[in-house]
Amino acid sequence: MISDLIVNIAVLTSFTFFWHQALKNNRLTLNSRTKIKILDGIIGGVLGIILMHYSIQVNEITILDLRHIPVILVAYFGGFLPAIVSAAIISIGRFFIDVNFSSVVSLFMMFTMAIGAGIIVRYVKVKGIKKWTLLLLYSQFVFTLALYIVVDAFSQVLNIAFFHIVSSLIGGFLTLYFVNYIRRYTELYNQYKDRSQRDPLTGLFNVRSFDYYYNLMLEKAQSAKEDCAVCIIDIDYFKKVNDKYGHPAGDEVLKQLALLLKKLMRDGDIVARNGGEEFSVLLDRCNLQQAEEVACRIRIAVERHSFILPSKEKINITVSIGVASYNGGEVDPVRLYQDADDALYKAKHEGRNNVCVKGDS
């Protein structure tokens, strides 16, 4: 019996590790989309069925395993819905093994566990390890009642329940440890990845990310015979802002401008900070005329926007923008960006607060 329960624990922890590793970018939470909750519920149900295939035969009609842990696991992170889905799939799997009195009791046991676990997660005001311990104890209580119904000898019930609760606690806490480990690892990885791609001050893409998306946009435009454009934006007289109000005020202006630029762009447009007071915008599927209209909209929006400094003082700034576009032919990444930079230089030279364009590349 002990060796079989060890196998159950090994299957449970290893499957859970790969399960959460595979879905690390779609973590199950109480606020997850319904599709994610159902998917995790299905996977939890499959794990429960696998665990039943490594079960212990208690008597002619009763098997013993850790199938309840996937149910309370998805309840712990996702609430009612994934727990109910897992319980349903595990119950169906139990009937495929055998249809008898024990499988009917198992059906009620699984749904009682799922519903109770959902109630605990939603309404009991405990968190973390305390909530998980409560779920394990509740599920073990339900299991012991079900075992009492299907096993005749009370002494046998006590012996089986003892081994099962020890296995459940060991397997349950190991499973939670693995899940939390993967989640912490994934969160740290995403933070490091985001920091490597983002400008720390504004949260926009940095130069490295801009180069990547810039080349990707050009490759896509060339293969699909589509237009694309680049806008380079520079704050006029930004040095005067720093000199007059201080660098913290200048940083605040940069952050607010970044937010304004993101609001003005379409979903999928790339906004990056090139460094200092210079920003870039990549416009996919956008010709020169459309890009010029976007640039003019940016210029006007910035001119009309009041930037609030840390001192609560409001100031206004202007920007100059250079625009260049690609409309087919051989791609020259250096030339397109240089055209936009030349247009920016012209906009600065002609008095600032201006938009200048350079013809299609």
Image (tube, rainbow, N blue to C red):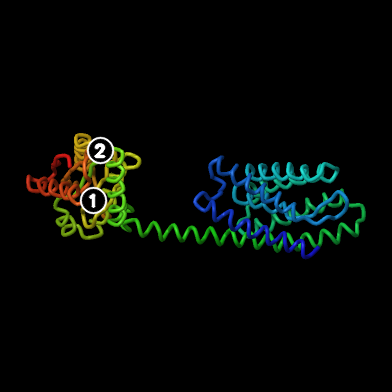
Disc count in the image?
2
**Residue 356: percent from left, percent from top:** 13, 42
Lateral position of residue 90 relative to residue 149, left or right: left
Seen in the picture, residue 91 relative to 195 is either above or below; the reply is above
Residue 107 in the image: x percent, y percent? Answer: 77, 43
Instruction: State the residue lying farthest toward the right.
Output: 153
**On screen, residue 22 above or below 327:** below
Q: Residue furthest left?
A: 350
Which quadrant of the figure contains the N terminus?
bottom right
Is residue 111 at least partly visible in the picture? no
**What's the residue type where badge 1 is placed?**
Phe
Q: Give residue 171's position: percent from left, percent from top.
A: 69, 61
Query: Could you tell me which residue is drawn at 16 percent across and 50 percent down?
Result: 338
User: Label 1, on which residue?
Assistant: 279
Disc 2 marks which residue? 227
Residue at image point 81% right, 44% down = 98
- As rendered, which of 252 and 84 lies closer to the eye? 84
Image quadrant holding the C terminus, namely: top left
Residue 235, image x, y percentages: 18, 50
Task: Name the foreground residue: 324 vs 182.
Answer: 324
**Can residue 53 be seen at all in this image of the molecule?**
yes
Q: Give the residue type that dot 2 points to.
A: Asp
Give the structural element (helix, strand or loop) at label 1.
Answer: strand
> Of residues 127 and 14, which is closer to you in this image?
14
Question: Dot 2 surroundings within 10 Å: few (below 14), some, or many (20 or more)?
Answer: many
Left or right of 131 on screen, residue 101: right
Q: Answer with mark 2 or mark 1, whichever residue precedes in sequence.
A: 2
Q: Nearer the viewer, mark 2 or mark 1?
A: 2
Q: What element carries label 2?
A: loop
